[in-house]
């Protein structure tokens, strides 16, 4: 079988209040590129070509099953800046055994967000096959 050439383009999360989520993700530094309020919004990540979107739902899933990861080159400074802007974190940046540094928070719809820094270890950890 031929290898498929794929690139992750977009992640979409549910929201019961897209407008509140837009404000939250703008505060995280994402750049809004589509406004289909009250049902939809899409953002461009400031680095790279990936996009991130929010779509309106009538009811949120009862158990979050997805964690959205945004990599930050200067994680500690970014977290500190966001805290000063009023963003509440569940955990401060912590070194993990998988060689990433991570901080967790929730968006207005309780979707789990991880801001992290992995550097070279994201694609090339010492245990890579």
Image: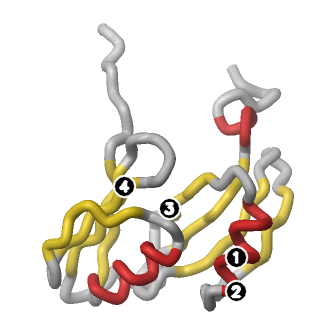
In the rendered structure, the answer to whether residue 21 lies left or right of residue 126 reads left
Q: Secondary structure at mark 3?
A: strand
Q: Marks 4 and 2, how far apart in space?
A: 23 Å
The residue wearing badge 3 is: 68
Using a 10 Å C-alpha cutoff, classify the residue at mark 2 as few (fewer than 14 neighbours), some (14 to 19) or many (20 or more). few
The residue wearing badge 2 is: 84
Using a 10 Å C-alpha cutoff, classify the residue at mark 4 as few (fewer than 14 neighbours), some (14 to 19) or many (20 or more). some
Q: Secondary structure at mark 1?
A: helix
Q: Where does the image place residue 18, in percent across and percent down from the top left?
A: 27, 82
Q: On residue 81, which mark appears?
A: 1
Residue placed at 62% from the left, 86% from the top? 85
Q: Marks 1 and 3, how far apart in space?
A: 20 Å
Q: Secondary structure at mark 2?
A: helix
Q: Marks 4 and 3, how far apart in space?
A: 14 Å
Q: Quadrant of the N terminus?
A: top left
Q: Where does the image place residue 80, in percent across and percent down from the top left?
A: 75, 76
Task: Tell me whether the residue at label 1 lies in contact with that at label 2, contact meaning CB atoms closer than 8 angstroms.
Answer: yes
Residue placed at 48% from the left, 81% from the top? 107
* Lower position in the chain sequence, tag 4 or tag 1: 4
User: Looking at the image, is 83 positioned above or below residue 1?
Assistant: below
Q: Secondary structure at mark 4?
A: strand
The residue wearing badge 4 is: 44
């Amino acid at each position: 079988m031929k290898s498929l050439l794929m690139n992750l383009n977009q992640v979409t999360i549910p929201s019961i209040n897209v407008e509140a989520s837009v404000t939250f993700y703008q505060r995280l530094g994402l750049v809004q590129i589509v406004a289909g309020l009250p049902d939809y919004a899409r953002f461009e990540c400031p680095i790279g070509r990936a996009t991130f979107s929010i779509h309106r739902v009538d009811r949120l899933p009862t158990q979050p099953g997805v964690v959205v990861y945004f990599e930050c080159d200067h994680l500690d400074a970014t977290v500190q800046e966001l805290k000063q802007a009023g963003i509440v974190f569940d955990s401060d940046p912590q070194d993990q055994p998988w060689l990433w540094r991570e901080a967790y928070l929730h968006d207005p719809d309780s979707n789990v967000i991880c801001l992290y820094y992995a550097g070279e270890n994201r694609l090339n950890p010492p245990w890579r096959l």
